[in-house]
Amino acid sequence: MSLLTLYHHPLSVCSMKVRLALEEKGLDWSSRIVDIVREQEQLEPWYIKLNPNGVIPTLEISNGTTEVVTNSASIIRFIATLPEGNSLSPTDKNDVQLMDKLIDLADEIDLQILSYARHPSMEKSEKILDTRINKSLLLAEQHPELRNNYLACAARSEKNKTFRVDEKHIKDIEQKAVESLSFAEKKLNGNIFLLGDRYSLADVIWTVVLSRLDLLGYTDWVDGNRFPLLGSYYQRAQDRKSFTLAQIQNEWWDK
């Protein structure tokens, strides 16, 4: 059996996706918290060497050799392929294609920009991004072998600063989100879960997406008013034991 170590942060939405997949799969895993708020630990050289993009989460798999998987969508798909634990993937080819489409639609909703844009303290979120940019540029000078990685990290944070106050960009993200929510709503017609009566990886990622939209104040989207089937689905998702075990956040933490 493989030893799984997840590098993550409790408040990271992408980390939540992976934690929920691990809990629903029923696997044992080790936790390594990476401080992305105060210490910006994801920018430390040891972590950049582990995940060249300098983002979380990262899953490390040890089984004689060590394998590393990055990007939350890729990680949850990898988790579903492991032979141990519960099945999170359908066997029918058409259902697999539908699951992949639902995962992609959820993953394409830019929750990071929406989170920065709708954070209750714009000053604090600005400070976090500025600290990230400054540390990236400093480390780029101190570690020339990782310079390109650090410059990419700085550029990404600069882009987040720009886009989070760009009303047109935010509206575009919201419009795409509504289109994806509408698709998911249709798939719940007559179904308990997105693929029918069986919980799958699509439910993992959509549970987290709905929880983050809930936290960000898109109440009309998640309370059953605009999308009644998704509203009921989201309530059922919160009742699952895994929702608590995976520390899915749908309320603001310390601002």
Image (cartoon, rainbow, N blue to C red):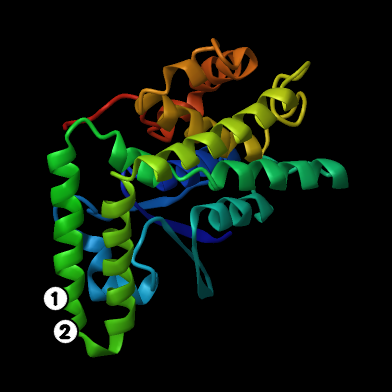
Q: Is residue 178 visible?
A: yes
Q: Position of residue 7 (x, y in %)?
A: 36, 57
Is disc 1 surrounded by few (<14), some (14 to 19) or many (20+) residues within 10 Å?
A: some
Locate the N terminus and report the quarter of the image it occupies. Answer: bottom right
Amino acid of disc 1 = Leu
Q: Nearer the viewer, residue 23 or 92?
A: 92
Q: Is residue 8 above or below residue 189?
A: below
Q: Nearer the viewer, residue 72 or 59?
A: 72
**Residue 184 picture quarter:** top right
Q: Residue at x 57, y 50 (%)?
A: 76
Image quadrant holding the C terminus, namely top left
Judging from the image, what secondary structure is the residue with disc 1 in? helix
The x, y position of residue 52, in whole percent, is: 38, 73
> Residue type at mark 2?
Glu
Does 151 sit left or right of 92 as displayed?
Answer: left
Q: Is residue 27 above or below residue 184?
A: below
Q: CA distance from mark 1 to mark 2?
A: 5 Å
User: In x, y percent, where is residue 214?
Assistant: 41, 24
What residue would you read off at disc 2? 141
Q: Which residue is mark 1?
A: 138
Q: Residue at x 54, y 56 (%)?
A: 75
